[in-house]
Image: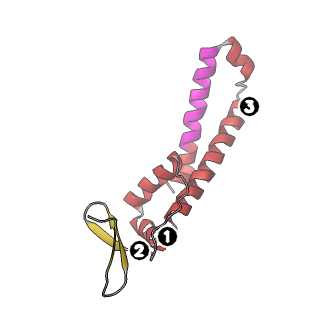
Amino acid sequence: MEKYITDERTGLRYELIGEIYYIAGDDEPETEQEPIGIWGQRHLRFIKEHNLSLYLELLMTGKLNGYLADIDRQAEEMFIRLMEDMAHMEGVTEQLKSHNQMGWVAKMNNIKQRAFEAIDRVIIFK
């Protein structure tokens, strides 16, 4: 099946969603899209499963890619800031890394997991 079809009678353009359904879309398919990282992809999966009306509205208005890119940017900035702040507050430094590598790795993994959970609660699954 073709990705895009145009109804010659009405002039409407339809986009193939999945393998079966066509949904009315923009006159022109998006040509230039911003890259979507892990955070944007996780949020996309969430809104497809739990907020289908938002997903379809963004898709049909052509704003889905920009919305997901913005979510991805916000989450990545928050992740970096949280990692740095938590590491500083808990005294996880390069000096600890050189003296006790396994202890440093354990602490950084713990900080990373907590940062992931915070971003999930605040940005991804809201």
First along the sequence among labels 2 and 1? 2
**Local crowd size for mark 3, using a 10 Å CA cut-off: few (<14), some (14–19), many (≥20):** few
Quarter placement of the N terminus: bottom left
| Rendered location of residue 77, percent (x, y) | 65, 47
Q: Main secondary structure of the magenta part?
A: helix
Q: Is residue 36 above or below residue 67?
A: above
User: Which one is nearer the viewer's eye here, 67 or 22?
Assistant: 22
User: Which one is nearer the viewer's eye here, 25 or 100?
Assistant: 25
| Rendered location of residue 50, percent (x, y) | 40, 60
User: Which residue is situated farthest in the bottom direction here?
Assistant: 9
* Kind of residue sitting beneath label 2: Gly
First along the sequence among labels 2 and 3? 2
Label 2 belongs to which residue? 25
Please give the label number shown on residue 107: none
Q: Secondary structure at mark 3?
A: helix
**Local crowd size for mark 1, using a 10 Å CA cut-off: few (<14), some (14–19), many (≥20):** some
- Residue 40 relative to residue 111: left or right: left
Q: Residue at x 70, y 12 (%)?
A: 99
Q: Secondary structure at mark 2?
A: loop
Q: Residue at x 48, y 73 (%)?
A: 61
* Kind of residue sitting beneath label 1: Gly
First along the sequence among labels 1 and 3? 1
Q: Secondary structure at mark 1?
A: loop
| Rendered location of residue 4, percent (x, y) | 35, 69
Q: Residue at x 47, y 51 (%)?
A: 41
Q: Is residue 75 above or below residue 64?
A: above
Label 1 belongs to which residue? 62
Q: Are marks 2 and 1 in contact (CB under 8 Å)?
A: yes
Please give the label number shown on residue 88: 3
User: Which one is nearer the viewer's eye here, 6 or 81?
Assistant: 6
- The span picked out in magenta is 101-117
Q: Is residue 107 magenta?
A: yes
